[in-house]
Image: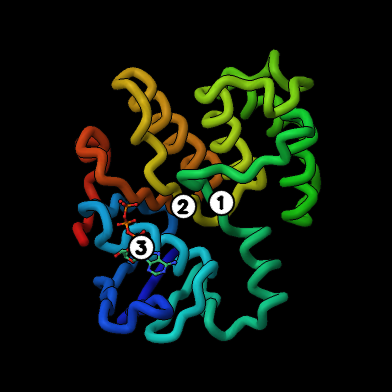
Amino acid sequence: MIRTDSLQFTYQHSEDEILRFPNIDLSPKEDLLILGPSGVGKTTLLHMLAGLLPLRKGDVFIANTQLNKLTRNQLDNFRGRHIGLIFQRTYFIRSLSVLENLTIRERFSKKKSDRYRREELVMQLGLSNLMNKRVYQLSEGQQQRLSIALGVIHKPKIILADEPTSDLDDANCEKVISVLKREAQICKSNLVIVTHDQRVKSHFNNQISL
Ligand SMILES: Nc1ncnc2c1ncn2[C@@H]1O[C@H](COP(=O)(O)OP(=O)(O)OP(=O)(O)O)[C@@H](O)[C@H]1O
């Protein structure tokens, strides 16, 4: 469940540009596609939903937790446990293996490590044979699939994906969307995608445009 109320954001040194966002109200397991042209504030909104940007105006509730009522530590713990982030630019530990990156992400969530879940997920994403490779040895496409695995391994309550398909050909775009939807179903989470990729539109009924 995700609910936002009267969200606004202004970046420091850009005080004349106020970004205003429509309210969001998602029931458990509901998907949302957020569309909009470059610069309109899609990434900013996603970062506010993830508690990565301070909420100066407006509220975000995730599974009945009001993000702006949490202390910094509580917010970090909440994000680690309950939010799955798939960024445009991914943050791996490049000198470690695929398996080590996944294990660290699992540990960070403070949830019990689930070997079956990990093996099933990497198989779905075609990463099973790459578990002992270091991240710098992977191709771009393999790294992108790993970023999805890292975003969902801990079964988050919400999965937030920023432009997950923008650099992909049509076949891989379809594949990534179906993997994300399937993971959201398995994790019983809300899936929120922000994109300007019009190919993704037909896959989601629930859409807002910024
Ligand atoms: N750190 C920052 N400091 C100041 N302004 C910023 C900062 N980050 C983003 N902005 C500005 O805020 C606005 C919204 O940016 P944002 O990245 O959220 O847009 P977007 O819709 O995700 O764009 P894109 O599709 O190109 O990724 C833009 O005008 C951008 O220039």
Note whether 158 is above or below 8 in the view shown. above
User: Which callout, 1 or 2, points at the residue further toward the start of the chain?
Assistant: 1
* Amino acid residing under circle 1: Gly
Q: Is mark 1 on a helix, strand or loop?
A: strand
Label ID, residue 26: 3
The quadrant where residue 59 appears? bottom left
Residue 138 location, quadrant: top right
Q: Mark 2 points at which residue?
A: 160
Measuring from the top left, give residue 195's x and y in whole percent. Answer: 30, 46
Quadrant location of the C terminus?
bottom left
In the picture, measured across the screen, residue 98 lies left or right of residue 87, that is: right
Looking at the rendered structure, the kind of residue marked 2 is: Leu
SS label for mark 2 = strand
Task: Report the image quarter containing ligand 1.
Answer: bottom left
Report the label total.
Answer: 3
Residue where numbered disc 1 is placed: 84
Above or below 124: residue 186: below
In three-dimensional space, the C-alpha distance between marks 3 and 1, rounded to whole angstroms, equals 16 Å
Do the CB atoms of the residues marked 1 and 2 lie less than 8 Å apart? yes
| Residue 107 in the image: above or below residue 178 | below
* Left or right: where 120 falls relative to 140: right
